[in-house]
Every structure is written in structure tokens, then in C-alpha cells.
Amino acid sequence: MGRGSVGIRGPRLHNGCMKARNGRGRGLAKTLLGGALVFAGIAHLTFARRDFQAQVPDFVPLEPDTTVVASGIAEITLGTALAVSQGKRAGTVGRIAAVFFAAVFPGNVSQYTQRRSAFGLDTDRKRFARLFFQPVLIVAALWSTRA
């Protein structure tokens, strides 16, 4: 098969172009996810602090504000690390981000089960739909870092 042809296993491009495009996509996703985490962390500490408090499950042994501040600091740190990490370190940071997204999922479940309105999630339908976004974040963290 020649240059730019399609084989049984999919497109074969000259000089690894497909790999380069996929790598750029992963890098862009990693940077966007890192930026989103930094933004969310800043929101935890400032303008959306009360909304984030509504997501803290009752079983968390800390005050909701303490939990929100700690989570905000963790998100800023994790987002920065995600955006700038390279190679094997990126994979490690991606796994940590995936674990973090899984760890905060009970907050989303609590918001749904306790019918707490925040972030425009003011109906059971909206709060339920939000639950399906968390697995997307987990996959994005792992995929974008090749973890």
C-alpha cells in the first residue's frame, strides 16, 4: 500500500501524520481539562463557593466550607500539573485526576439525592443528567495523558 492509502487496519499516513494529529488532540484535551480544573478551583475559592457547598455530602466529617476550600486548592494544583506535565509524569497526573474525579462523584450524587440546587441544576432531571458527565471527565483525564 502506498502513501495516504487505507488498509485493513485503517488509514496509513506518511511520516506518522495520524499519530501526530492524535497526539495534538490529546495535548489539547489535557490542556483544556487542566484549565477547566484551575477555573473550577478558583470558583471554589471565590464566586461559586456557596454552590459548591451545596454539593458536599452530609457524611463528610469536615465543615462544607473547609471541604470546598480544600477541594479548590486541590483542583488548582491538579489542573496546573495536568496542563504542564509531559511524558510519564502526565500519565501519573492523569491517573490522579481520574481518581479525584471519582472521589468527588459522591458530591454530585448527594446534590441529586438531596435535591440541592446549584450551578443552574435546579431540577431532578438536570441533576440526574449531571451524573453522567463525571465518567466523561475520568475518561478524558486518562485518554489525554495516555494513562
Image: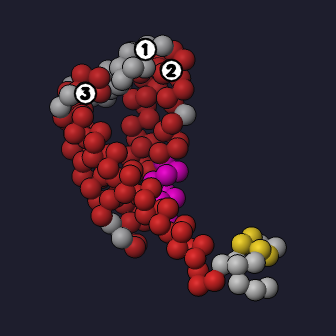
Residue bearing mark 3: 48
Residues at badges 1 and 2 in contact (C-beta under 8 Å)?
yes
- As helix, strand or loop, the secondary structure at mark 3 comes to loop
Q: Percent from the top left, x then y, of residue 146?
A: 49, 65
Quarter placement of the N terminus: bottom right
- As helix, strand or loop, the secondary structure at mark 1 comes to loop
Whole-number angstrom distance, CA of label 1 to CA of label 3: 15 Å
The kind of residue tagged 3 is Ala
Q: Percent from the top left, x then y, of residue 130?
A: 49, 29
Magenta stretch, main secondary structure, is helix
In screen coordinates, is 103 left or right of 9? left
For residue 126, which numbered disc appears in the image?
2
| Residue neighbourhood size for the residue with mark 2, other residues' Cα within 10 Å, grouped as few (<14), some (14–19), many (≥20) | few
Q: Which residues are magenta?
A: 138-147
84 to 33, vertically: above or below? below
Question: Is residue 145 something one can see in this rendering?
Answer: no
Residue at x 29% of width, y 27% of height: 52
